[in-house]
Amino acid sequence: MSNLTFEQMLADKKFLVSDGATGTNLMQRGLPQGVTAENWVLNKPEAISGLYRDFVQAGSDVILTCTFGASRLRLEAAGLADRFTAVNTEAVRLAKAETAAGGALVAGSLGPLGQMLKPLGLLDETDAEAAYREQAEALAAAGVDLLVVETQFDLSEALAAVRGAKTACSLPLIVSFSYDRGTRTMMGVSPAKFAQAMRGMGLAAVGINCGKSLEDNLAALKELADASDLPIWFKPNAGLPSLDENGRPIYDVTPEDMASRVAEWAAAGARIMGGCCGTSPAHLKAIADQVRLLR
């Protein structure tokens, strides 16, 4: 882990490299369909450590913990509710072990809760806030450097997540939305509306991750940069997948394709760059090589 805070590292380096995909890389390493990545945190930790290690070696300044689906609500659905503390704590421990020598930061990942909030669903905002607060507390207690609430699509849930995380701890907080309808989320949220809702919430950065094409993500990035003065976290997918003969996803955007876009992403406002689904350590290294040229 680094002796620098997220804000200090960003000021020092100007541009940072995040990591790549968790789930799709673990699938390529044998994660069976229907088994969550969080299951492997406890039952195949060497695979989790290996992925963290590969990202650090590829040039990551920030790696996300394998806790995207580790809220108590998501773990209940996966049959792991009684392992809530163990999953979150162990995921952080494994990440810290791989970053100890190189100085990369460990970011606690908090993904969507997997349930729609009222009135569209059954989940109360207070229960959503409590779920995020509980996970943020567990990640902070385990020693993460910052928190990333990622792949959000609903403003109500994102705001509940911010309230929960801010109640839990004072760590730097990033919130990242996923735009899978061009420059709109599945709930119709635009980058400008997201930026407006997060204004004054005390965030360290706002972000974009996942989505569909590189072109759509770039358009969303430009809209977000126009609407927000905060640093922007940017982790687009490596395109959209097809399936191989074993049912595993294959992404058509190459490491060279993503590397060729880095200067454009930076010019559009991205400060922390990496990739989401389909982004391998090879993609990440190609991105990191280009980011170093910008510093």
Image (tube, rainbow, N blue to C red):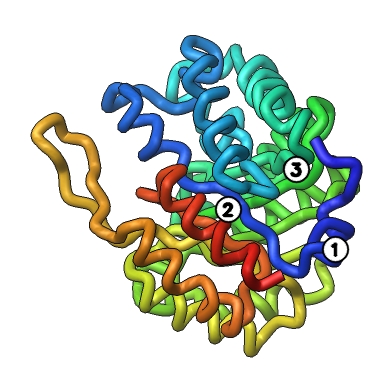
Q: Residue furthest left?
A: 245
Q: Which residue is mark 3?
A: 105
Q: CA distance from mark 3 to mark 2?
A: 17 Å
Q: Quadrant of the C terminus?
A: bottom right
Q: Quadrant of residue 291?
A: bottom right
Q: CA distance from mark 1 to mark 2?
A: 25 Å
Relative height, residue 59 to residue 216 (above, below): above
SS type, badge 1: helix
Q: CA distance from mark 3 to mark 1?
A: 14 Å
Residue type of the residue flagged with mark 1: Asp
Label 1 packing within 10 angstroms: few (<14), some (14-19), many (20+)? few
For marks 3 and 2, the one nearer the N-term is 3
Across and down, in percent, residue 262 comes to: 51, 71
Looking at the picture, tell me which residue is in the foreground, 1 or 141: 1
Residue type of the residue flagged with mark 2: Glu
Name the residue at 62% across, 39% down: 56
Q: Which residue is mark 2?
A: 150
Q: Which residue is mark 1?
A: 12
For marks 3 and 1, the one nearer the N-term is 1
Name the residue at 69% across, 54% down: 160
Q: Is residue 58 left or right of residue 135?
A: left
Across and down, in percent, residue 162 comes to: 74, 55
Name the residue at 38% across, 77% down: 216
For marks 1 and 2, the one nearer the N-term is 1
SS type, badge 2: strand
Residue type of the residue flagged with mark 3: Leu
Residue 207 visible in the current orientation: yes
Across and down, in percent, residue 94 comes to: 66, 22
Relative height, residue 230 to residue 202 (above, below): below
Of badges 3 and 2, the one in the foreground is 3
Label 2 packing within 10 angstroms: few (<14), some (14-19), many (20+)? many
Name the residue at 83% across, 28% down: 141
